[in-house]
Amino acid sequence: MAGMTSNRPYLIRALYEWIVDNNQTPHLLVDASGDQVVVPQQFVKEGRIVLNIGPNAVRGLEMSNDLIVFGARFGGMSMEVLVPPSAVLGIYAQENGRGMLFPQDDPETDEADEEPEPPTPGGGRRPKLTLVK
């Protein structure tokens, strides 16, 4: 699977939709110390911040593979929030805590998380699909 992009942005979008479809409030746990992270620093605790990204709490929510962007109010002040998916440590429903946590040290790809292929009987390599023209 070499060369594949991170699955984190896809999982974030899928879990967001699942949480909202179940009438729950999606929250992001974010590593606020990461590059490109723009969040209200007065609400950061121990380098992390929890952000309510529910449809009633934010405006203009865009979740691309490179950046999560939305506008929100913090202490009465409007602010544009920017969070790269690699800085998202988890997404969960506020009401019941159901969701997913991600490893903190996410490389650009998930190759580091892959397990090596188990050996096949007889010591040979695992069979692979090949393109037939």
Image (cartoon, helix red, strand yellow):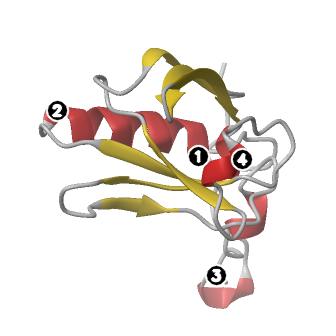
Which marked residue is nearer to the observer: mark 4 or mark 1?
A: 4
Residue at the image position 25 percent from the left and 39 percent from the top? 18
- Which is nearer the eye, 79 or 95? 79
Residue ranking furthest to the bottom: 122
To which quarter of the image does residue 83 belong?
Answer: top right
Amino acid, disc 4 = Gln
Amino acid, disc 2 = Asp
Instruction: Decide: is 90 above or below 108.
Output: below
- Residue denoted by label 1: 8
> How far is disc 2 from disc 3 in space, using C-alphas?
38 Å
Instruction: Decide: is 55 above or below 111.
Output: above
Marked residue nearer the N-terminal end (1 or 3): 1
Mark 2 is surrounded, within 10 Å at the Cα level, by few (under 14), some (14 to 19) or many (20 or more) other residues, namely few
Marked residue nearer the N-terminal end (4 or 1): 1
- Residue denoted by label 4: 41
Q: Is residue 25 left or right of residue 88?
A: left
Q: Is residue 87 visible?
A: yes
Mark 4 is surrounded, within 10 Å at the Cα level, by few (under 14), some (14 to 19) or many (20 or more) other residues, namely few
- Residue denoted by label 3: 118
Instruction: Decide: is 94 above or below 103.
Output: above
- Which is nearer the eye, 58 or 6? 58
> How far is disc 1 from disc 2 in space, using C-alphas?
20 Å
- Residue denoted by label 2: 21
